Image: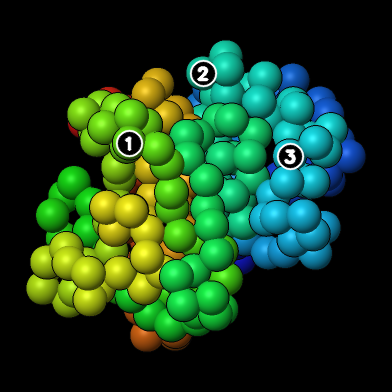
């Protein structure tokens, strides 16, 4: 993640330790990024322990004041556990870890090829929550086929509504299971991830982008 943000996207990156709790130097022009990984070994469930780290409490306070937050994979799981995003990420429908390229589509209606690598990426929420996030246009990415069609065969993990990424109602916090940072370099043969960052991170996550 750091390499993609710093080297591929040319952003200034400040690394934060999970025991840090001071975000006073951050402004509403900055974005806190929670990367993928296996925080605390994914014991209990993904993100359940990391949610209580000092940095997460600071991140919650930052987000509640309008600060921008991005969570990718395990970062998405942590944001859901922390209550910054609705729903939960459950074990994949096939009960297996999945690592492959998939296609996702956002409100720009352009299918993007982005890698996934997770064992618990199946988005789930109750019917009322699903209706709310759908009506509020909080679904920012859905799994699709190479032509952009959203269907069951293009859903890698059984996520409801083929959901790959969502945002909160205020549109300053968003999370996604696919890894755009792994698709930002021509050397890796794929730069579709740059389009994700350009539309959601670098463009300040405005309602004009996500609505």
Disc 3 from disc 2: Cα separation: 19 Å
Percent from the top left, x then y, of residue 135? 21, 29
Front tag of 2 and 1: 1
Q: Mark 3 points at which residue?
A: 51
**Residue 127 circle label:** 1
Screen quadrant of the N terminus: bottom right
- Classify 10 Å Cα crowding around label 3: few (below 14), some (14-19), many (20 and above): many
Hey, which quadrant is residue 56 in on the image? top right
Disc 3 from disc 1: Cα separation: 25 Å
Front tag of 3 and 2: 3
In the drawing, does residue 158 fall left or right of residue 88? left
Q: Mark 2 points at which residue?
A: 66
Sequence-wise, which precedes: disc 2 or disc 1? Answer: 2
Hey, which quadrant is residue 111 in on the image? bottom left
> Which residue is drawn at the image coordinates 26% and 32% (left, top)?
131
- Let me know if residue 169 appears in the view: yes
């Amino acid at each position: 993640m750091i390499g993609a943000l710093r080297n591929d996207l040319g952003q200034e990156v400040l690394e934060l330790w999970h025991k840090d709790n001071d975000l006073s130097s951050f402004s509403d022009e900055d974005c806190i990024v929670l990367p993928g990984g296996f925080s605390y070994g994914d014991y209990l469930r993904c993100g359940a322990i990391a949610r209580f780290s000092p940095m997460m409490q600071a991140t919650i306070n930052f987000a509640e004041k309008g600060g921008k937050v991005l969570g990718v994979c395990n970062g998405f799981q942590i944001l859901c556990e922390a209550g910054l995003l609705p729903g939960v990420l459950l074990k994949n429908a096939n009960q297996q870890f999945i690592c492959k390229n998939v296609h996702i589509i956002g409100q720009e209606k352009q299918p993007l090829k982005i890698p996934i690598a997770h064992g618990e990426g199946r988005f789930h929420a109750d019917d009322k929550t699903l209706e709310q996030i759908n009506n509020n246009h909080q679904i920012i990415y859905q799994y699709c086929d190479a032509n952009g069609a959203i269907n069951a065969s293009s859903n890698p993990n059984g996520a409801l509504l083929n959901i790959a990424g969502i945002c909160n109602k205020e549109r300053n916090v968003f999370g996604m299971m696919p890894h755009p940072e792994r698709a930002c370099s021509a050397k890796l043969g794929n730069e579709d991830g740059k389009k994700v960052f350009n539309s959601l991170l670098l463009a300040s996550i405005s309602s004009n982008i996500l609505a």
